[in-house]
Image (tube, rainbow, N blue to C red):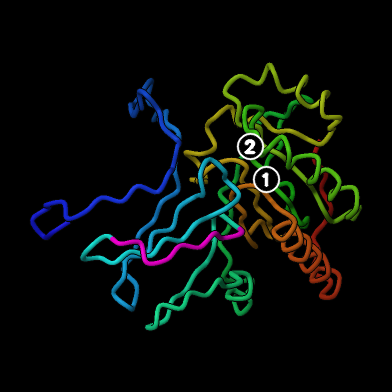
């Protein structure tokens, strides 16, 4: 567009997600958003070209980077990316680098980590679980829903990770985000899953502002965020999660900084 808002050119890149009747409204004091999202971001690079990052087609696992001439709209080049949530950098020549976001944060002192907002949620097994009682544990928290296809594929993998770690200082918790939890027991039974499930009842996105499901958070022994993963955990991301988890468990063992043990019920 020009500075006056006139359209100079239009580019179509085959993003098929659509909703016939998108809804954005406030109902009973809650924000209701009903649409099929497309992750899309645009920025002018140091070489003056327009860089557009998007999901690739209908998948939530891959990304695509398109580079356009700002004056003509000509597509200069395009590249598929192995993740829908990459960390990218571009130099003045237009060369693009995919960066390891975990390596960028290795200098962050644990004391500067952001504490996760505390919660007290009903458990599918009965009773309630409060985040505060898990102090002293390294906690892996996964937000999911029965209607979320990537969640269905990812949850058995996380359950296997829990069994592999088998550390008394590690707690794996999941938060189901179905507004109606009636389908949850049958869903878990069909997949042969038996991990603890807390009931968010569709309210957690407003509380924790995650971009979509699945959403996974690793917490240190003081309830602070070590790292977040949004979207499906592919092999590379799962390896990063496992490495960060083991590092946190070793940190407590080496420093003797563990707190009294607490268990989720």
Quarter of the rendering containing residue 250: bottom right
**Furthest-top residue in this view:** 182
Tell me, yes or no, whether the two marked residues, 2 and 1, touch with CB atoms within 8 Å. yes
Q: Nearer the viewer, residue 117 or 211?
A: 211
Residue found at the very far bottom of the displayed protein: 92
Range of the magenta residues?
74-82
Question: In the displayed structure, would residue 20 be above or below residue 102?
Answer: above
Judging depth in this view, the residue of 253 and 18 nearest the camera is 18
Q: Residue at point 73% right, 42% down?
A: 154
Residue position marked by numbered label 2 in the rendering: 120
How far is mark 2 from mark 1, CA to CA? 7 Å
User: What label does residue 104 carry, if any?
Assistant: none
Tell me: 13 left or right of 124.
left
Q: Secondary structure at mark 1?
A: helix
Residue 128 location (% of width, % of height):
71, 31
Q: Is residue 81 above or below residue 45?
A: above
Q: How many marks?
A: 2
- Residues packed near mark 2 inside 10 Å, few (<14), some (14 to 19) or many (20 plus): some
Q: Position of residue 199 (x, y in %)?
A: 65, 29
Horizontal and vertical percent position of residue 91 = 42, 81
Q: Main secondary structure of the magenta part?
A: strand
Instruction: Tell me where residue 34 sits by quadrant.
Output: top left
**Horizontal arrangement in the rendering, residue 220 relative to residue 158 (left or right):** left
User: As rendered, which of 242 and 42 lies closer to the eye?
Assistant: 42
Residue at (25%, 65%) from the top-left corner? 70
- Residue annotated with mark 1: 131
Residue drawn at the location 78% of the way across and 60% of the way down? 242
Figure quadrant of the N terminus: bottom left
Q: Answer with mark 2 or mark 1, whichever residue precedes in sequence.
A: 2
Query: In the image, is residue 153 above or below residue 191?
Result: below
């Amino acid at each position: 567009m020009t500075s006056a808002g006139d359209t100079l050119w239009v580019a179509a890149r085959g993003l098929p997600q659509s909703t016939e009747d998108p809804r954005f409204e406030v109902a009973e004091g809650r924000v209701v958003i009903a649409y099929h999202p497309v992750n899309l971001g645009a920025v002018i690079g140091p070489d003056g070209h327009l860089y557009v990052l998007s999901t690739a087609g209908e998948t939530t696992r891959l990304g695509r980077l398109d580079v356009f001439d700002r004056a003509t709209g000509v597509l200069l080049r395009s590249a598929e990316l192995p993740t829908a949530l990459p960390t990218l950098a571009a130099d003045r020549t237009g060369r693009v680098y995919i960066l390891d976001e975990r390596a960028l944060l290795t200098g962050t002192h644990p004391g500067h980590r952001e504490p996760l907002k505390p919660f007290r949620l009903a458990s599918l097994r009965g009773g309630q679980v409060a985040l505060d009682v898990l102090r002293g544990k390294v906690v892996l928290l996964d937000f999911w829903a029965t209607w979320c296809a990537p969640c269905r594929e990812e949850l058995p993998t996380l359950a296997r990770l829990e069994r592999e770690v088998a550390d008394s200082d590690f707690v794996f918790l999941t938060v189901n985000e179905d507004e109606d939890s009636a389908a949850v027991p049958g869903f878990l039974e069909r997949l042969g899953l038996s991990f603890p499930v807390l009931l968010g009842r569709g309210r957690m996105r407003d509380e924790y502002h995650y971009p979509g499901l699945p959403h996974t958070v690793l917490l240190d022994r003081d309830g602070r965020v070590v790292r977040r993963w949004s979207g499906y955990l592919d092999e590379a991301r799962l390896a990063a999660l496992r490495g960060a988890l083991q590092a946190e468990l070793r940190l407590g063992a080496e420093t003797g900084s563990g707190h009294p043990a607490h268990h989720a019920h």
